Amino acid sequence: MALKIRYNSPVVLTFSLVCIAVYFADLVFSVGASPESVGPITSNFFMLPGNFDWANPMNYVRLLSYTMGHANQAHIMGNMSIFLLIAPIMEEKYGSRRILLMMVLTALITGVLQIMLFSSGLLGASGIVFMFIVLVSFADVRKGTIPLTFILVVLFFIGQEVVHSLQDNQVSEYAHIMGGIMGGIFGMFFKENQPSINTSNQTVASDLLDN
């Protein structure tokens, strides 16, 4: 029997493909430029500027689109490798609509706080990736309990970002920390998808008929 390729996680895969397309389009339009410089497509459409102009309609689009732009190969490879490893599992668990809502809220809240609290720009899906890293630690959450995995993730990943934020580098640890906070909130308040009663009944009936 021939195996078919299945578009198993529409939200995650579509987001990833857009990020990859933006990166490769920038490679084409920035031939001859410095490898460390951000491409023209990313800088104009997929990067949240530090000097946010509230009168510019395009800046409001960038409050979401900045998550799809990346500075260089290491940046996009680092984000997409973790994102594609974890996010499809979460989309199957919570459903496409909820995952899309989580990603949009994480991007918007992180972006709005960035322009209100800091003067630097914002670029990349790192905040969303950290949201998923913390969210996946709630995979075995039970009512009235806090998973030990969640505590360890906070200590190792978020704690590391807090330490890095005290250093002078070009990375926005704030976005990572904010993404982790959003993942914790979603993990506590969003319920995973439950199979419908009709589906369960049909499965049981089918098993009985097979026997």
Image (cartoon, rainbow, N blue to C red):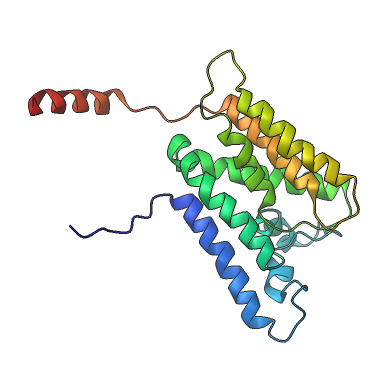
Q: Position of residue 9 (x, y in %)?
A: 43, 49
Q: Is residue 66 left or right of residue 186?
A: right
Location of residue 140 with respect to 75 vertically, above or below: above
Farthest residue to the top: give it.
144
**54 vs 40, nearest the viewer:** 40
Q: Position of residue 28 (x, y in %)?
A: 62, 81
Which image quadrant: the N terminus? bottom left
**162 vs 40, nearest the viewer:** 162
Q: Position of residue 115 (x, y in %)?
A: 83, 50
Residue 18: quadrant of the picture: bottom right
Please report the residue visible at 60 percent of the width from the left and 25 percent of the height from the top.
Answer: 188
Residue 145 seen in this snapshot: yes
Location of residue 28 with respect to 73 vertically, above or below: below
Please report the residue visible at 86 percent of the width from the left and 45 percent of the height from the top.
Answer: 165
Q: Position of residue 113 (x, y in %)?
A: 80, 44
Please report the residue visible at 64 percent of the width from the left and 78 percent of the height from the top.
Answer: 27
Q: Is residue 177 left or right of residue 170?
A: left
User: Number of numbered discs present?
Assistant: 0
Location of residue 70 with respect to 180 vertically, above or below: below
Which image quadrant: the C terminus? top left
Residue 68 seen in this snapshot: no
Please report the residue visible at 15 percent of the width from the left and 26 percent of the height from the top.
Answer: 207
Q: Is residue 23 left or right of residue 117?
A: left
